[in-house]
Amino acid sequence: EAGVTQFPSHSVIEKGQTVTLRCDPISGHDNLYWYRRVMGKEIKFLLHFVKESKQDESGMPNNRFLAERTGGTYSTLKVQPAELEDSGVYFCASSQVTGRDEAFFGQGTRLTVV
Amino acid sequence: AQSVSQHNHHVILSEAASLELGCNYSYGGTVNLFWYVQYPGQHLQLLLKYFSGDPLVKGIKGFEAEFIKSKFSFNLRKPSVQWSDTAEYFCAVSAGNNRKLIWGLGTSLGVNP
């Protein structure tokens, strides 16, 4: 069974540019989460999808971040325009519907804004 | 606000030494507790979890953790570490039915052969 996959694994962009991160969850997993780890800080929750609906987006930093999950399958996280403080590792995770389920993580996308 | 505190940020041990990593959380209600590990170059993976029942939880690779409700703690232990345990370890908490995880800063463990 394929795990959670994220693209790209690394991205270096200039301040002001746009970047789109993609996450493919495990097939059949309705829950999809985005997290971010800024260097030296703890991993922080960004948002949670159930199928195509945003269940909780309380962790999104500001309106430069836009997450979508078309058709309840893969998800994208777009940062536009990128700022220096957006640098970090962006993790995606997915889990099944059941209440006490384990979240499976992708390897993350390391974003560097210069 | 909920928070998770990991006491040790960098730990270096020799093989066969015992390991205990501290984790405390701040939340007064029902919690679900997790330890995740990230081996070099790999994705985060679950070591063990606690939802209810026996407060002593056994996980993969010989790890265990004990939930002490009165101390708001969920410390991770392993009696004898191996070189292959070199990794970063994260404690995480979710509150009640809320699925989002609140994370500690992580502990980088190095094991010398």
Image (cartoon, helix red, strand yellow):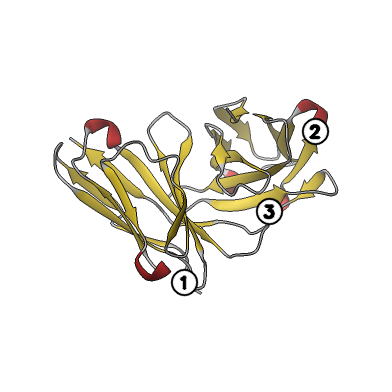
Q: Amino acid at mark 3?
A: Lys
* Residue at x 80% of width, y 33% of height: B69
- What residue sits right under mark 1 in the picture? A2
Chain letter behind tag 3: B
Query: Where is B13 relative to B63, above or below?
Result: above
Q: Quadrant where the C terminus of chain A lies?
A: top left
Q: Which mark is residue B71?
A: none
Secondary structure under tag 1 reads loop
Does A58 sit left or right of B63 as displayed? left
Q: Position of residue A49 (x, y in %)?
A: 46, 57
Does B1 sit left or right of B77 as displayed? left
Q: Amino acid at mark 2?
A: Lys
- What residue sits right under mark 2 in the picture? B69
Q: Position of residue B51 (x, y in %)?
A: 74, 49
Chain letter behind tag 2: B
Reading the chain from its start, which is encountered first: label 3 or label 2? Answer: 3
Q: Amino acid at mark 1?
A: Ala
Tag nearer the camera, 1 or 3: 1
